[in-house]
Amino acid sequence: MKTFKIFLTIIALLTATFTACNDGIDDISPVDAGPDESAPTVTINYPIEGTQVMVTEPVTSITIRFEVVDDIEIDEVKVTLDGTEIASYDTFIDYRRFVGSLLYEELTNGEHTLVVSAKDIEGKTTSSTVNFMKVPPYQAKYDGEVFYMAFNGDYMELISQTDATIVGEPGFSANGYSGQAYAGATDSYITFPMDDLQGTTFSATFWYKPNADPSAAGLLSVSPEGEDRTKGLRFFREGNATEQRFKLNVGTGSGETWNDGPVLDISDNQWVHIAFSISETECIIYINGEATLTALMADVIDWTGTTNISIGSGAPNFVYWGHNSDLSLFDELRIFNKALSQEEIQTVMADEGQPIAYEAKYDGEIFYMPFDGNYKELISDMEAALVGTPGFAGVAKMGSDAYAGATDAYITFPSSGLTGDAFSAAFWYKANPDPERAGLISISPEGEDRTKGLRFFREGNATEQRFKLNIGTGEGEVWNDGGTIALPSDEWVHLAFTVSTTNCIIYINGVETLVSATGVAIDWTGCSSISIGSGAPNFAYWDHKSDLSYFDDLRFFNKALSQEEIATIITDAE
């Protein structure tokens, strides 16, 4: 009986203890996760598109990094390489987010395709694909070449197969001159030992896409501690948003040599090739293979106290005068233990794919955009400006790609030098009738003013589209209600229009559809830019906004093309 009482007392104490422990704590109640509305998102963090894995061994390892996120619950993740499954996951600690890191140890030379796919509990799937390569080790390609960084997804110096040291958080741009490029960031740069790079002569070459913010920055610096410019070298820039001067400072032991270099117009946001060479007697800065300024050397370079080269900044030893991190893009950086000649620099440029200047193919041709993966006009070698996010089609009538329109997106180009008494345009076109009307090419002044410039556009429905041209003559406007094409169609159609002081004509597949009298030349007053792929910003009324169609091989002419000339352009594409 006594034992039974003790047992009841223990139960009472335990009950009281548990009750006390739960005081103030709410009961856990299940919460409805809601409907599963979205498929998973899959992001491959490494390798990224275009990565080149370059190591000595014919077979190496690679760490694949990826992330999967779902709104409700991930059910399964699979990783395949070149069509073979190399990993799968079906158990997740966080059922809405999975961060994967997979070591694959059998990567061989050649091209590879990596696919990460994910499925949620409702069966919705998403896949992400990356193409990359493992390539054999790099061998020095040029006389005197002792250093090469391609920046294709890593910071490896490819001759020594050694990784640079990373300071801060620099990154990569997918829009490099050749593949990917080094992308500068605030308080960030990379360094590399100078042990095998010091000599009495020195050269460097690289491609560069400038970002003028900040207005001064260090590009390459081999500098001793302190504010000492009598040793090593410093290559840097100074200027403003439109112009930058590139300078070189070389330490000769007892003094310093200054080369105040060229001023470069950077407002067009283009890639430029930069090089400098240092001999025992002079140093020279080259821009796009042309010598710009030569400075005499009082003596050879003195490397005393210099241990590393900093890339993308003057830091850590040349940060005074504001020469900190450069936020620009760098690509194809090479260092040589000799003073390169101009011919050698131009050879490097050509080998690295320096675009050959396009020469007009047809009489009167003043503008040509092939849309082969970029928005560059080849005669001027200038990039168009992007509004919104237009894209590329992945298919083409000519070349490797075509312009793909997108909602609220188009490109613009200055009209200066393209406008005259006569004007023609010719291009290939694959129509998307949704939306039912859109602007194709517009050179229009601000406001609802059609007495200046021109507007080429379409109107219709899902089965038929009519192409129209409106011309401003100063005192009034001329309408050409053009011709039609039948839809749906997966065929490319050739469109052209010509404008002279007597008439304007629209051609479809080389066939004249309608002629309208003009009587006078186009009035271009207030027409400063050309919009391609939309009527916006100045001819967006009447719903002539972005065209979601494909455009290819766009050409402008400073003459009214004949029907025979248009037929030749079409024939050349066949």
Image (cartoon, rainbow, N blue to C red):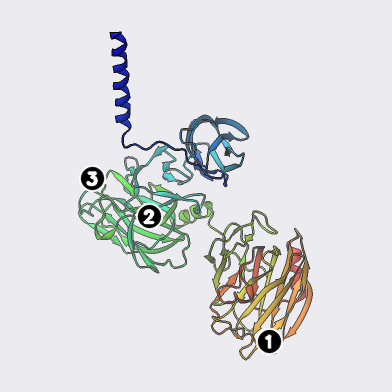
Graded by Cα atoms within 10 Å as few (under 14), some (14 to 19) or many (20 or more), the crowding at tag 3 reads few
Q: From mark 3 to mark 1, how far is it between C-alphas?
A: 72 Å
Quadrant for residue 78, please give it: top right
Residue 260 appears at what percent x and percent y? Answer: 32, 64
Q: Which mark is residue 456?
A: none
Q: Name the residue tied to disc 1.
A: 501
Q: From mark 2 to mark 1, how far is it between C-alphas?
A: 55 Å
Graded by Cα atoms within 10 Å as few (under 14), some (14 to 19) or many (20 or more), the crowding at tag 1 reads some
Query: Which marked residue is nearer to the observer: mark 2 or mark 1?
Result: 1
Residue 415 appears at what percent x and percent y? Answer: 56, 76
Q: Secondary structure at mark 3?
A: loop
Identified by mark 1, the residue type is Thr
State which tag comes first along the sequence, 3 or 1: 3
Identified by mark 3, the residue type is Gly
Identified by mark 2, the residue type is Ser
Depicted 305 relative to depicted 470: above or below:
above
Q: Is residue 394 left or right of residue 342?
A: right
Query: Which marked residue is nearer to the observer: mark 3 or mark 1?
Result: 1
Q: Name the residue tied to disc 3.
A: 305
Q: Which residue extends farthest front?
A: 1
State which tag comes first along the sequence, 2 or 3: 2
Seen at 33% across and 48% down, the residue is 310
Depicted 174 relative to depicted 493: above or below:
above
Q: Nearer the viewer, residue 428 or 201?
A: 428
Q: Name the residue tied to disc 2.
A: 277
Q: Quadrant of the N terminus?
A: top left
Q: Residue 528: in sight, yes or no?
A: yes
Quadrant for residue 307, please give it: top left
Seen at 38% across and 60% down, the residue is 285
Q: Is residue 214 left or right of residue 269?
A: left
Depicted 434 relative to depicted 181: above or below:
below
